[in-house]
Image (cartoon, helix red, strand yellow):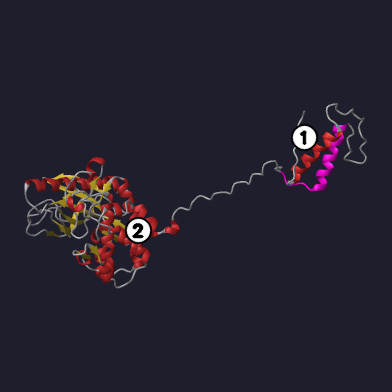
Amino acid sequence: MSYCLNSSCPSPHNPTGTNFCNTCGAKLLLKERYRAIKPIGQGGFGKTFLAVDEDKPSQPRCVIKQFFPQAQGTNTVQKAAELFTQEAVRLDELGKHPQIPELLAYFSLNNQQYLVQEFIDGRDLAQELANIGVFNETQIRQVLNNLLPVLQFVHEHQVIHRDIKPENIIQRNRDKQLVLVDFGASKVATSATLGRTGTVIGSAGYVAPEQGIGKAVFASDLYSLGVTCIHLLTQLHPFELFDVNEGVWVWRKFLKNPVNNQLGRILDKLLEGATNRRYQTAADVFKDLNPSSAPAAPTVKAKKQQPPPNSPATPPKTRSIIDDELAELKSQILGNPTPKNPSQKPASPTPPKASQSKSQIDLELEELKSQFLGSPNQKKPPSQI
């Protein structure tokens, strides 16, 4: 099957292998390699087609996005064209991440803009919800744990997605990883643009309050992620989960499967209307969601206990050892050293020092002994006159 991309073609379906449309004669191969097979979606700014890349031997599938704004008016079309171009730029910058589609080509042909990107084989979370019903707590945790690192990566590249919702999150079949798609509404955040009112864009019900007045910030994506989670938990539109009279979310009233308090607090903080009370980074959400897997604090080794003042650093000596050592010291001072070994002969006596009497030496040795033994009744040596 080949599908004609001429928007005015009355019969776009063509047999496989056809190079020119049988109805309007338009060329069916873009850039001599990309062949559209069937339409798979249409948004405000363009149409999306499943395609194959015939330039490669395996003819892998890919996605063709055709710029085709539905709204009319010069300013609207011009803004839509800018956003379409921005999507190509964002994908070129971010598409190397395994959970973001890779940009394969971006070009203009016959005054029409085209974007070709990697095809993600899987179902988006809106389709999953319709197929399996409401998500339980375990599934919501899996969604958050899988998607938060991707959002952190996007935000670290100074990009705000601005359209987080179930339809833009695809669960890939081959590895069950979640892939964030559709960067058509994304915005580069700089210190200048964050404080400036910009385009009001996003999907109704999922848009954060500040984004609704054109002042999206990184935390705006986290708000939309929180709304996505409570929609998956209840299968109700976000408008039904918010009490406009009280100005509060009432999603717990509609739960079919309860969630524990920890996850409930995390979702509530994601849904905060005031940005200063909301989570600021995806990493903060991930940390609260997985407190036990957070990086462990460095082990602090106990400091070596310092010896108290006036005490030896080596293990304390017994009283008998101290007595022996002090006796030897006294003998050396008086000129009559005591041999440590019985076979050792005493050395020749040395005359005692004239300035030291025996009583003076005894007092000083007693002071040393009391210091070694920690005696509370230490006496100060007599003052020298």
Query: Can residue 16 be seen at all in this image of the molecule?
Result: no
Image: magenta residue range? 314-334
Query: Residue under circle 2?
Result: 146
Query: Residue under circle 1?
Result: 382
For residue 332: magenta?
A: yes
What amino acid is at disc 2?
Asn
Query: Mark 2 touching mark 1, by CB under 8 A?
Result: no
Task: Specify the principal SS of the magenta part.
Answer: helix
* Nearer the observer, 368 or 127: 368
* Nearer the observer, 327 or 255: 327
Please provide percent x and percent y for residue 342. Answer: 92, 41
Among numbered discs 2 and 1, the one appearing first in the sequence:
2
Q: Is residue 312 left or right of residue 344?
A: left
Please provide percent x and percent y for residue 211. Answer: 21, 52
Q: Is residue 380 left or right of residue 213?
A: right
Does 237 sit above or below residue 45?
Answer: below
| Quadrant location of the N terminus in the rendered image | bottom left
| Quadrant location of the C terminus in the rendered image | top right
Helix, strand or loop at disc 2?
helix
Residue at 83% in and 27% down: 355
Query: Can residue 380 be seen at all in this image of the molecule?
Result: yes
Residue at 34% in and 66% down: 139
Please provide percent x and percent y for residue 71. Answer: 9, 53
Using the rendered view, name the quadrant where residue 253 is placed: bottom left
